[in-house]
Image (cartoon, rainbow, N blue to C red):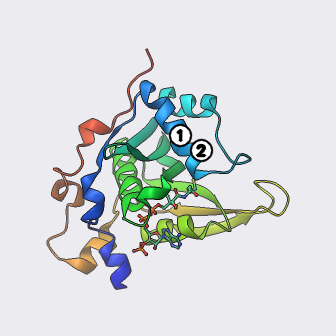
Protein backbone atom coordinates (compact mmCIF):
# COMPACT_ATOMS: atom_id res chain seq x y z
CA UNK A 1 0.00 0.00 0.00
CA UNK A 2 1.53 3.30 -1.04
CA UNK A 3 1.86 6.26 1.25
CA UNK A 4 -0.35 8.26 -1.11
CA UNK A 5 -3.17 5.74 -0.80
CA UNK A 6 -2.95 5.44 2.97
CA UNK A 7 -2.92 9.22 3.25
CA UNK A 8 -6.38 9.24 1.64
CA UNK A 9 -7.94 8.19 4.93
CA UNK A 10 -7.51 11.48 6.66
CA UNK A 11 -9.08 14.65 5.28
CA UNK A 12 -6.25 17.15 4.80
CA UNK A 13 -6.00 19.96 7.34
CA UNK A 14 -6.64 22.47 4.55
CA UNK A 15 -9.88 20.74 3.51
CA UNK A 16 -11.26 20.71 7.05
CA UNK A 17 -11.92 24.43 7.00
CA UNK A 18 -14.83 23.80 4.61
CA UNK A 19 -18.25 22.82 5.92
CA UNK A 20 -19.99 20.02 4.01
CA UNK A 21 -23.76 19.94 4.09
CA UNK A 22 -26.59 18.49 2.04
CA UNK A 23 -27.44 20.98 -0.70
CA UNK A 24 -30.91 22.48 -0.77
CA UNK A 25 -33.06 23.70 -3.58
CA UNK A 26 -32.04 27.33 -2.98
CA UNK A 27 -28.38 26.35 -3.45
CA UNK A 28 -29.09 25.87 -7.16
CA UNK A 29 -27.66 29.28 -8.31
CA UNK A 30 -24.43 28.64 -6.36
CA UNK A 31 -24.15 25.14 -7.84
CA UNK A 32 -24.64 26.53 -11.35
CA UNK A 33 -21.78 28.99 -10.74
CA UNK A 34 -19.55 26.07 -9.70
CA UNK A 35 -20.64 24.18 -12.81
CA UNK A 36 -19.61 27.14 -15.00
CA UNK A 37 -16.20 27.23 -13.34
CA UNK A 38 -15.69 23.50 -13.70
CA UNK A 39 -16.77 22.76 -17.25
CA UNK A 40 -16.65 24.23 -20.72
CA UNK A 41 -19.86 25.31 -22.46
CA UNK A 42 -20.21 21.97 -24.29
CA UNK A 43 -19.86 19.92 -21.11
CA UNK A 44 -21.93 21.94 -18.70
CA UNK A 45 -25.02 20.56 -17.06
CA UNK A 46 -28.18 22.63 -17.43
CA UNK A 47 -30.17 24.16 -14.59
CA UNK A 48 -32.76 21.48 -15.22
CA UNK A 49 -30.22 18.68 -14.82
CA UNK A 50 -28.99 20.10 -11.51
CA UNK A 51 -32.56 20.65 -10.31
CA UNK A 52 -33.10 16.96 -11.02
CA UNK A 53 -30.11 16.11 -8.84
CA UNK A 54 -31.42 18.25 -6.01
CA UNK A 55 -35.00 17.04 -6.13
CA UNK A 56 -34.79 13.52 -7.51
CA UNK A 57 -35.35 10.37 -5.51
CA UNK A 58 -32.30 8.66 -4.04
CA UNK A 59 -30.00 11.61 -4.70
CA UNK A 60 -27.13 12.83 -2.54
CA UNK A 61 -25.84 16.34 -3.24
CA UNK A 62 -23.27 17.82 -0.86
CA UNK A 63 -22.08 21.39 -1.02
CA UNK A 64 -18.78 22.56 0.48
CA UNK A 65 -18.50 26.12 1.69
CA UNK A 66 -15.93 28.32 3.24
CA UNK A 67 -16.98 31.96 2.91
CA UNK A 68 -18.34 31.03 -0.52
CA UNK A 69 -19.51 27.80 -2.13
CA UNK A 70 -16.32 25.95 -3.02
CA UNK A 71 -17.36 22.56 -4.34
CA UNK A 72 -20.19 20.15 -4.93
CA UNK A 73 -20.63 16.39 -5.39
CA UNK A 74 -23.72 14.58 -6.69
CA UNK A 75 -24.54 10.88 -6.50
CA UNK A 76 -27.60 8.70 -6.91
CA UNK A 77 -28.43 5.43 -5.22
CA UNK A 78 -30.67 2.69 -6.60
CA UNK A 79 -30.73 -0.38 -4.40
CA UNK A 80 -27.17 -1.50 -3.74
CA UNK A 81 -25.60 0.45 -6.62
CA UNK A 82 -24.70 4.12 -6.50
CA UNK A 83 -23.58 6.36 -9.34
CA UNK A 84 -21.18 9.22 -8.87
CA UNK A 85 -22.57 11.83 -11.28
CA UNK A 86 -20.54 14.95 -10.68
CA UNK A 87 -17.82 16.52 -8.57
CA UNK A 88 -16.64 20.07 -9.05
CA UNK A 89 -14.25 22.20 -7.02
CA UNK A 90 -13.91 25.91 -7.83
CA UNK A 91 -10.47 26.63 -9.32
CA UNK A 92 -9.41 28.83 -6.37
CA UNK A 93 -9.89 25.91 -3.96
CA UNK A 94 -8.26 23.09 -5.92
CA UNK A 95 -5.34 20.91 -4.80
CA UNK A 96 -6.19 21.35 -1.13
CA UNK A 97 -7.87 17.99 -0.66
CA UNK A 98 -11.43 19.27 -1.03
CA UNK A 99 -12.29 17.08 -4.03
CA UNK A 100 -11.17 14.00 -2.09
CA UNK A 101 -13.12 15.08 0.96
CA UNK A 102 -16.30 15.72 -1.04
CA UNK A 103 -16.20 12.36 -2.79
CA UNK A 104 -15.34 10.55 0.43
CA UNK A 105 -18.31 12.21 2.17
CA UNK A 106 -20.54 11.27 -0.78
CA UNK A 107 -19.39 7.65 -0.53
CA UNK A 108 -20.18 7.53 3.18
CA UNK A 109 -23.62 9.01 2.51
CA UNK A 110 -24.57 6.51 -0.23
CA UNK A 111 -23.27 3.64 1.87
CA UNK A 112 -25.58 4.87 4.61
CA UNK A 113 -28.37 4.83 2.02
CA UNK A 114 -27.68 1.15 1.25
CA UNK A 115 -25.20 1.25 -1.65
CA UNK A 116 -22.60 -1.51 -1.75
CA UNK A 117 -20.79 -0.52 -4.96
CA UNK A 118 -20.34 2.72 -6.90
CA UNK A 119 -19.95 3.31 -10.63
CA UNK A 120 -18.90 6.42 -12.52
CA UNK A 121 -17.88 7.53 -15.97
CA UNK A 122 -15.22 10.12 -16.62
CA UNK A 123 -13.71 11.51 -19.82
CA UNK A 124 -10.53 9.54 -20.41
CA UNK A 125 -8.44 12.73 -20.70
CA UNK A 126 -9.54 14.04 -17.28
CA UNK A 127 -6.33 13.17 -15.45
CA UNK A 128 -7.21 15.10 -12.29
CA UNK A 129 -10.50 13.29 -11.75
CA UNK A 130 -9.13 9.86 -12.71
CA UNK A 131 -6.26 10.28 -10.23
CA UNK A 132 -8.67 11.38 -7.50
CA UNK A 133 -11.02 8.44 -8.05
CA UNK A 134 -8.08 6.02 -8.13
CA UNK A 135 -6.87 7.27 -4.78
CA UNK A 136 -10.24 6.44 -3.25
CA UNK A 137 -10.20 2.88 -4.56
CA UNK A 138 -12.07 3.13 -7.88
CA UNK A 139 -10.80 0.69 -10.49
CA UNK A 140 -10.95 1.08 -14.25
CA UNK A 141 -13.58 -1.25 -15.69
CA UNK A 142 -13.72 -0.47 -19.42
CA UNK A 143 -13.81 2.29 -22.01
CA UNK A 144 -17.02 3.45 -23.69
CA UNK A 145 -15.92 4.83 -27.03
CA UNK A 146 -17.22 8.22 -28.23
CA UNK A 147 -19.46 8.47 -25.18
CA UNK A 148 -19.10 12.26 -24.91
CA UNK A 149 -18.82 12.83 -28.69
CA UNK A 150 -16.49 11.73 -31.49
CA UNK A 151 -13.08 10.86 -30.04
CA UNK A 152 -14.20 11.70 -26.52
CA UNK A 153 -14.22 8.35 -24.79
CA UNK A 154 -15.49 7.61 -21.29
CA UNK A 155 -13.62 5.56 -18.77
CA UNK A 156 -16.00 3.51 -16.63
CA UNK A 157 -14.74 3.11 -13.07
CA UNK A 158 -16.09 1.09 -10.18
CA UNK A 159 -15.62 0.95 -6.45
CA UNK A 160 -16.48 -2.68 -5.84
CA UNK A 161 -16.80 -3.08 -2.12
CA UNK A 162 -18.27 -0.02 -0.50
CA UNK A 163 -19.42 -2.09 2.47
CA UNK A 164 -15.82 -2.71 3.47
CA UNK A 165 -14.57 0.66 2.21
CA UNK A 166 -12.07 1.95 3.11
CA UNK A 167 -11.25 -1.30 4.91
CA UNK A 168 -8.08 -2.37 3.16
CA UNK A 169 -6.83 1.21 3.22
CA UNK A 170 -7.70 1.58 6.90
CA UNK A 171 -6.11 -1.70 7.94
CA UNK A 172 -2.91 -0.69 6.20
CA UNK A 173 -2.70 2.44 8.31
CA UNK A 174 -3.74 1.25 11.71
CA UNK A 175 -5.27 -1.76 13.40
CA UNK A 176 -7.50 0.61 15.32
CA UNK A 177 -8.93 2.38 12.29
CA UNK A 178 -11.78 -0.11 12.02
CA UNK A 179 -14.65 2.33 12.00
CA UNK A 180 -13.87 5.21 9.71
CA UNK A 181 -17.30 6.81 9.93
CA UNK A 182 -17.27 6.80 13.72
CA UNK A 183 -13.81 8.30 13.82
CA UNK A 184 -14.94 11.13 11.62
CA UNK A 185 -18.29 11.71 13.28
CA UNK A 186 -17.33 15.28 14.16
CA UNK A 187 -16.21 15.95 10.65
CA UNK A 188 -19.20 14.47 8.88
CA UNK A 189 -22.70 14.12 10.22
CA UNK A 190 -24.54 11.40 8.34
CA UNK A 191 -27.80 12.95 9.55
CA UNK A 192 -26.83 16.06 7.60
CA UNK A 193 -26.31 14.17 4.41
CA UNK A 194 -29.84 13.26 3.41
CA UNK A 195 -31.10 15.27 0.48
CA UNK A 196 -34.24 17.16 1.33
CA UNK A 197 -37.47 15.77 -0.05
CA UNK A 198 -39.08 17.66 -2.88
CA UNK A 199 -41.92 19.84 -1.57
C1 LIG B 1 -11.29 16.91 -10.35
C2 LIG B 1 -11.44 17.97 -9.27
C3 LIG B 1 -12.80 17.85 -8.62
C4 LIG B 1 -10.35 17.73 -8.20
O1 LIG B 1 -10.59 18.62 -7.10
P1 LIG B 1 -9.44 19.04 -6.07
O2 LIG B 1 -10.09 19.63 -4.89
O3 LIG B 1 -8.40 19.84 -6.77
O4 LIG B 1 -8.82 17.62 -5.71
P2 LIG B 1 -7.90 17.28 -4.45
O5 LIG B 1 -7.14 18.48 -4.02
O6 LIG B 1 -8.73 16.59 -3.44
O7 LIG B 1 -6.89 16.26 -5.13
C5 LIG B 1 -6.81 14.93 -4.70
C6 LIG B 1 -5.85 14.17 -5.59
O8 LIG B 1 -6.40 14.05 -6.92
C7 LIG B 1 -5.31 14.15 -7.87
N1 LIG B 1 -5.41 15.41 -8.61
C8 LIG B 1 -6.20 16.47 -8.37
N2 LIG B 1 -6.02 17.42 -9.30
C9 LIG B 1 -5.07 16.96 -10.13
C10 LIG B 1 -4.45 17.47 -11.30
N3 LIG B 1 -4.78 18.68 -11.80
N4 LIG B 1 -3.55 16.70 -11.95
C11 LIG B 1 -3.22 15.48 -11.50
N5 LIG B 1 -3.77 14.92 -10.36
C12 LIG B 1 -4.68 15.66 -9.71
C13 LIG B 1 -4.04 14.15 -7.04
O9 LIG B 1 -3.69 12.80 -6.79
C14 LIG B 1 -4.51 14.83 -5.77
O10 LIG B 1 -3.70 14.59 -4.67
P3 LIG B 1 -2.42 15.55 -4.38
O11 LIG B 1 -2.90 16.97 -4.43
O12 LIG B 1 -1.98 15.11 -3.02
O13 LIG B 1 -1.43 15.23 -5.48
C15 LIG B 1 -11.22 19.41 -9.84
O14 LIG B 1 -10.01 19.43 -10.60
C16 LIG B 1 -12.36 19.90 -10.73
O15 LIG B 1 -13.34 20.45 -10.23
N6 LIG B 1 -12.24 19.69 -12.05
C17 LIG B 1 -13.27 20.17 -13.00
C18 LIG B 1 -14.54 19.35 -12.90
C19 LIG B 1 -14.29 17.89 -13.22
O16 LIG B 1 -13.59 17.54 -14.16
N7 LIG B 1 -14.93 17.00 -12.41
C20 LIG B 1 -14.78 15.56 -12.57
C21 LIG B 1 -15.73 14.99 -13.55
S1 LIG B 1 -17.44 15.15 -13.04
Relative to residue 138, is residue 185 depicted above or below? above
Q: Secondary structure at mark 2?
A: helix
Q: Secondary structure at mark 1?
A: helix
The image position of residue 178, as x and y in percent, is 19, 66
The image position of residue 172, as x and y in percent, is 27, 80
Residue marked by disc 1:
33
Q: Quadrant of residue 23?
A: top left
The image position of residue 183, as x and y in percent, is 16, 59
Q: Quadrant of residue 124?
A: bottom right
Mark 2 Cβ inside 8 Å of ligand 1: no
Q: Quadrant of residue 167?
A: bottom left
Q: Residue at x 68, y 51 (%)?
A: 40
Relative to residue 112, is residue 153 depicted above or below? below
Q: In which quadrant is the C terminus drawn?
A: top left
Mark 2 Cα shell of 10 Å, populated few (<14), some (14-19), many (≥20):
some
Residue farthest bottom in this picture: 2
Q: Are marks 1 and 2 in contact (CB under 8 Å)?
A: yes
Residue marked by disc 2:
36
Q: In which quadrant is the N terminus drawn?
A: bottom left
What whole-number distance in Å separates the C-alpha atoms at marks 1 and 2? Answer: 5 Å
Amino acid sequence: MSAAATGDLEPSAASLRFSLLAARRDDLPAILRLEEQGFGPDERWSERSWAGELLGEGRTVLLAREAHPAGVVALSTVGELADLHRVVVAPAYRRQGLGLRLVRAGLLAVRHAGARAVMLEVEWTNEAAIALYGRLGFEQLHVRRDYYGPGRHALIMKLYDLEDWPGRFARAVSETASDFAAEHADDLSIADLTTEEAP
